[in-house]
Image (spheres, rainbow, N blue to C red):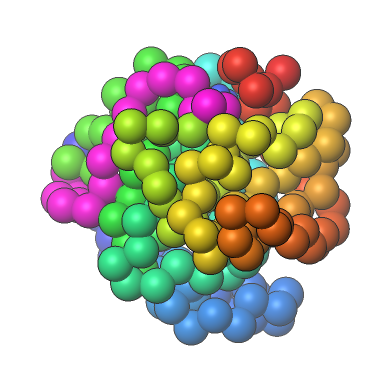
Amino acid sequence: MPFEDNYRQKGLRRALVKLLIEKGISNAAVLEAINTVPRHIFLDKVFLEHAYQDKAFPIGDGQTISQPYTVALQSQLLNPQKGDKVLEIGTGSGYQASVLAEMGVRLYTIEQSKYHYGKAKAYFRYFKYQNIYSFLGDGSKGLAFKAPFDKIIVTAGAPIIPKDLIDQLAVGGVLVIPVGNKEKQEMIRLRKVDDKKITKENFGNCAFVPLVGHNGW
Ligand code: SAH
């Protein structure tokens, strides 16, 4: 999987970071990670022109790599700190996972599609990420045997906030999840204040591919 990351691609990445700042992303660690991860390698070579536009893109098997703004927004809402134990549901291309790994978290990521699981795993190995642990399975139930997590990020649209995910959050933990119907969702940030209390904030409309599985569609 040898790939090139030349001055042109680095320049396109810097321009993308500038655009994300204009769109309201202010978390320096998020912006730095986006400036570092070569998004173009997660797309087929012929789509190089598209890699650094702020657009979602088909990655095969009916799935998409999220729009850079969406990746940046979810990362900013999650606000991961170095060493945090984070669960991502919906590995997809592996791009969001790589951005979080660059931020120094311990990233557990789960994907239901064997095709994407295998492909993303090969990227993680190629980039020698020591802090990404990838799993194949139904992430709508979380990853109980590795719980609790400081932060959980769901990158597919859910019909409800699965109780399993709240249960697998550490006290003080944060869950970022798009909730709604199959076409349109709202970006929700849930905080587990203590064992009995949670708070929820709404960060507006978004559109993800559906979360499938036990607690999904
Ligand atoms: N984070 C990804 C975006 C992936 S799109 C990226 O950076 O590219 C959403 C992904 O969620 C798809 O790959 C889909 O297969 C996966 N998905 C949907 N339901 C799932 C479930 N119940 N468990 C695990 N993965 C799921």
Determine if the magenta segment contains residue 131: yes
Badge count: 0
Above or below for 166 versus 84: above
Q: Which residues are magenta?
A: 126-141
> Visible in this render: residue 115?
no
112 relative to 114 in the view: left or right: right
Identify the image quadrant of the N terminus. top left
130 relative to 27 in the view: left or right: left
Above or below for 142 versus 168: above
Q: Residue at x 72, y 75 (%)?
A: 23
Identify which residue, 166 or 138, lies in the foreground: 166
Question: Residue 180, located in which quarter of the rendered image?
Answer: top right
Q: Position of residue 210 (x, y in %)?
A: 69, 27
Q: Position of residue 131 (x, y in %)?
A: 22, 53
Question: Residue 46, located in which quarter of the rendered image?
Answer: top left
133 relative to 200 in the view: left or right: left
Q: Residue at x 36, y 63 (%)?
A: 84
Determine if the magenta segment contains residue 62: no
Q: Position of residue 120 (x, y in %)?
A: 33, 34
Above or below for 173 versus 108: below
167 relative to 184 in the view: left or right: left
Identify the image quadrant of the C terminus. top right
Q: Residue at x 70, y 57 (%)?
A: 198
> Visible in this render: residue 212?
yes
Identify which residue, 78 or 164, lies in the foreground: 164
Q: Position of residue 115 (x, y in %)?
A: 39, 18
